[in-house]
Image: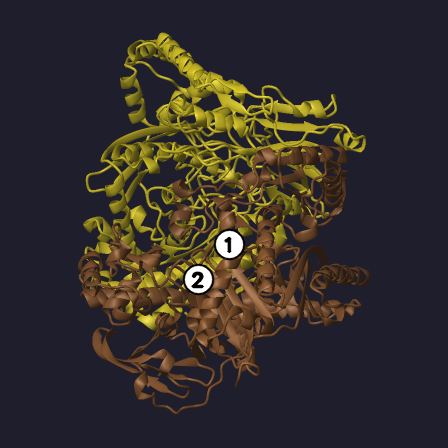
Chain colours: A yellow, B brown
Amino acid sequence: MTIMKNITDGNAVGSLLKSGLSLNDHRNLILQRTKETGFYDGRKNLELKESDPIAYERIFSKLRAGLVSSREVAKKIAASPIVEQEGELCFTLYNVAGDCIATSTGIIIHVGTMGAAIKYMIQNNWEANPGINPGDMFTNNDCQIGNVHPCDIATIVPIFHDDTLVGWVGGVTHVIDVGAVGPGSMSNGQIQRFGDGVQITCRKTGVNDTPLRDWLHESQRNVRTPKYWILDEKTRIAGCHMIRDLVEETIREEGVEAYEQFAMEVVEDGRRGLTSRIKSMTIPGTYKTVAFVDVPYSHEDVAVPSPFAKVDTIMHAPCEITVKPDATWRLDFEGCSRWGWHTYNANPVAFTSGIWVMMTQTLVPTERINDGARYATEFRLPKGTWTNPDDRRTAHADAWHFLVSSWSSLWRGISRSYFGRGYLEEVNAGNSNPCNWLQGGGINQEGEIHAVNSFETAACGTGACAVKDGLNHAAAIWNPEGDMGDIEIWELAEPLLYMGRTIKTNSGGYGKYRGGLGFETLRMVWGSADWTMFFMGNGYMNSDWGLMGGYPSATGYRFEAHETGLLDRIRDGMSLPQGKDLNPDMPEFEKHISPSAKVKRDKQCITTEAIFENGDLYLNYLRGGPGFGDPLDRDPKAVEEDLNQNFLLPSYAEKVYGVSAMRDEDGHWEVDLKETEIRRKVIRQARVAAGVPVRDWMEQERVKILDHDASVQVKQMFASSFALSPKFLAEFKSFWDLPDHWQLLEESLGIPMFGAKHHMDISELPDVHPVIMTEQ
Amino acid sequence: MNQLSNPVEVMGIDAGGTMTDTFFVRADGEFVVGKAQSNINESQAVLESSTDALAHWGRSVEDVFPEMVTCVFSGTAMLNRVVGRKGLRTGLIVSKGFEDFHRMGRAIQSYLGYAFEDRIHLNTHRYDQPLVEIKDTRGVTERIDSQGNVVIPVRLHEAREAARELIEQGCKAIVISLLSSYLNGKHERDVRDVCLEVAREKGVDIPVFASVDYYPVRKESHRTNTTVLEAYAAEPSRATLGTLSDSLKDCGASFDLRVMASHGGTISWKAKELARSLVSGPIGGVIGAKFLGERLGYENIACSDIGGTSFDMALITKNNFAMHQDGDMARLVLSLPLVSMDTIGAGAGSFVRIDPYTNSIKLGPDSAGYRVGTCWPDGGVDTVSVTDCHIILGYLNPDNFLGGILNLDVERARQSIKTQIADPLGLSVEDAASGVIELLDLSLRQHLRAMITGKGYSPRDFVCFSYGGGGPVHAYGYTKGLGFKETIVPAWAAGFSAFGCATADFEYRYDKSVDIGITHESGEAEVEAAVGTLQAAWNELREKVLEEFRINGFTDDEVTLTPGYRMQYLGQLNDLEIDSPLAALSSADDWNELVQAFDDTYARVYASAARSPELGFGITGAILRGSVETKKPNIPEEPDAGPTPAPEASLGSRPFYYEKKWVEAKLYKMELLKPGNEIKGPAVIESDATTFVVPPGFETFLDVNRLFHLIER
């Protein structure tokens, strides 16, 4: 069938591998051997590593160094500050089956997302059509395959040796705009996949190392910011090709057999690496945690295309972590709430892969992380929940809103284990919910169509440790190597003049060790022609909680102001809003803008596009981290220092920390230790007086439950969890000792239920075979 | 030659934290090295060290200083002042609303300098104390936008108040850094003048630094840190250097003391931008390699310097080293142009451990440092180091380590390697130790190669210079198979950095950010304007450069000026530094030449496919370097004594383990080898300060300039 081959460049089945197996059979056999033995590919012995540890290390070290340096070189090609300043790119090397061998630095969630794309191509017989040949490039960002959100674009390049496939390399960048309904890479407002931005499904976009022109033309006109798009793609391609060269060279030096053996053993080695960490850092047993975050969509400032999305809901993420005696573990998300008509849905790969972004910051901070860690972890992500939607219409643009919230609780859970083992330095009270996401677009100061997504959020406050405070304005739960970037760089990219960048007073959760403080930047729209912006973050609820008596971080809020009269005030030399919104309870900015300005200052932290004119204001508040331990145990001198650094509002020193402090005429605070001791005693006594036995408190709560006495949002959240999980319902009823007939149904709440009962999964499309890697 | 016809001409000073080294070169290229313990009184240490050095020639300081023509200083005092936060109390004036940005730093500063595993390990991150405290920071209402337009005119009454408060509360210097001042310096200069006025009124004499007068480049955190360093750290150093200069003069010196600066030239201690001398140590070797290359005809050189704790690499292409625009030092982001060097935290003394989680060898990131390893019981180290591996395999001489001043216990090292490394891996002690060395060398080799290929070159086009105390030990290992034209080990490898400092040009370099963008749609007038903007920036920098030389008594016509620029495809965030193909620009036609030079470089660095001329071209920075001729050391030149080493150069032999077997290596005394001598591996060539290893399969010869050439057979 020569003609067929010419048309599709497809491969005869089995022609890609020396074994004569199809890629799918090859992968299935690996999975089967893994399942049967408990070792990846049945590799009970690491023959290469054990017989020649030096050669093994030589290959690892060479590949890993090459991945890192390729990323460093390639990222300099990019124009997007997201890629170049924030480092939102990652290169990963895979074996033939699409399992990750090693990865560069960067956002390593993509270890799994690109692996899922490769597995999808394998499982759906890409080798027959469109064919997999040397010099090909494939592009993927499809969330139904495993991408976290559409703005992460992956380029995948197969690697051949003597016409035989020996692996794959993938490169991913977080692009600035992906052509969704609203501008920005993680926009909201769209509620279905069909408005979530362009979605590319493992499409062959290049042959002979050259991108195809139809792809270039089509993709560039589908996004708002083609200049960034073009350079991002060049960045990915250049990096992939550098890594492909490296693999070819390694094979020349070490031989193809040694390379292929390494490419399998290293995954098993990675599996063992995780279990040995679990063994040394944790205590076997079951840890239960839970997380919530708000989706306030009934508000007038949230414009969505469909009436059924105009509801306030709450994300519910209970999680049971089981550390097993053999030091493998299981993460079970039974009881999660349903997916929704918003952009915060996740798919299982976003979970199973994304979790390593967090775990490498704490449990496994090593360059040796690879897909082996996944093989040492059992995930259960029940179908129909937001962690595993059963409908192909779901939107995912800001899956992070839910993911970070649920990971914060995992970090708390695992920190309890560290605490129990005595690894106090490793404890982290859960880290912050990194937001706000300042996004928007229009025509910028250069007169071009533009979109922005400020990554200042990469430097939020971190969670407190059990021996020290969290770090101020330092990192994000998805990137320990956080950075806020220079103002003078962001001002090039955004038509937004900074009017301040300051540490956010009071934003870190109180505690014996307080959470790291966030920061805030006040922006005045400047030089734009047409401009919109919106807010994205948590506002009504905290998704980080604090640990062992520590408080959560301060909640979010939004501040925006229109018709400010600022340009006149500047001209007239009048006072101006600058720097800090010190105490949101006693607003200061409003005193320095026109009295007739239209100000929005509230807890509505998710909005959709609003028009901003030059001179309008937008406050970007980047959150603090949660605290650890009882604030009454905080060293009064540390509170004094917080006051002197303007990290804490004086009234909270007294209210929360029980610290009595005086300010001298130079403005310096000094604590009165004796007074403080008395104050703290009084607070402790008041606590005892206000306390009730848990049994009594539970009884009061039980009555409320029996009466369905809760806000409709809370009821909807539980009702959706109950509907999906009889097990969760049973546990709930047993915990609260509820009668058998007790029930809570969404139907009774008088809110739209569109999508609650009728779905169509992606697997129902013809000829589509989704890759399933978790229990569901 | 007598003393009159062979005077001592060049002096290099390397004032480290513990030792102050001096390096004197005679007209015939012969040199001596002196050592003295460092002292708070730097002048005293320098004089003691000089006395020690010159004693080798039987001469005295008073005798030699009057005949010398040049002296270059490099030291760590300024860096230590920064690291220890012991600088001058400095006040900072910023745009109002941004009082926190300096203390916030950039989050990147919380993990700068960390090894990879700590960079991702969040709970290890920490911030250093800010250079300027918040109580010494004031804001002044003003704003300039990203195109240099005034949005909020500066309110100078606030500046007046700020200056008054800062002076009254005890600040000894004031730094002004306002947003976007690099595009429009008017506000900063107005505030500067107000501060000077207030100081005058109050009768205090304090220095005032406006960032635009020093480092007018984009990125406020870099620019502010760097300008603060001028006040905080460089001013105190200027005082020290002034004292040193005076005391040298008291001994009869008539030369002007120069200081090694981060851009690879030397500058006067009177220079305005003295913070440039914050980083100087490792650069010396690069300058020395460039100098040797120019004299001996090597135009492409890969420089490699391995010490006890780190491996520093740099590239010289066509006799030029690359520059890095926003370097960092002491965990601070800076806007100093730095000689581009890649450093990895693995050195000849790195610790070796088995990672308990993966049962694999882990090198560093920490190292035994001066405590050597388990082979030196008095060092108090229980963890195996790379040095231990070298000692037990016969690479290093346990009886002549650092000239024999330490008593090493080979058996103790063997035992430590056995229990800590070999047994857990199931290897023999020898195979484990040689595996460690192989992995370290591989890692160095990978980095060296990545640096070369990452810039679009191939090792085939380069000679590799290997120096530093550990360089000659590892040279064969990290160059093996890379395909360098040659690997060269100077016989004075251990003192190569000090030598290099003495060879540096007297050179000032000024940078300025500019914003030029030209696309296909741009008309002739726009191109003309762009060319005009760049030329205007060069003119401005030219004045600054010439002014620096005037301070040191040079006339303008003595200064050689070299213009350069930083270019990018429009919209990119990175750019490349290009030496201008044209000395001056006059018409729109010149633009094409600028573009061509950039396009060629880009294709080499990032591969042709990454070129994006369709986006247009931007120039982000103007650069001007100015230099004057200085006296450089001569390179030693000795007659060829034939291939066979003299009998007295031979020190016998010892067992040497290489590629899984013991062989007998011949031993030589480095100082007694003569030009022309050829040595086949296995051989070890020893001197007090370094050891040159020539394993089986390699050979070397010493040339007339006392450079060893290592050849892989």
Write down the residue under mark 2. B36
* Residue A249 appears left or right of A261: right
The answer to the question of whether label 1 and label 2 lie on touching residues, with beta carbons closer than 8 A, is no
Q: Residue at x 77, y 60 (%)?
A: B536
Q: Amino acid at mark 1?
A: Asn
Residue A370 pos. (x, y %): 34, 52
Precedes in sequence: disc 1 or disc 2: 2
Q: Nearer the viewer, residue A134 or B417?
A: B417
- Please provide percent x and percent y for residue B139: 67, 35
Name the foreground residue: B124 vs A343.
Answer: B124
The quadrant in which the C terminus of chain B is found is bottom left
Write down the quadrant of residue A14 in the picture. Answer: bottom left
Q: Residue furthest bottom?
A: B642
Q: Residue at x 40, y 52 (%)?
A: B115
Do pointers 1 and 2 mark residues of a single chain?
yes
Task: Give the residue pinned by disc 1.
Answer: B41
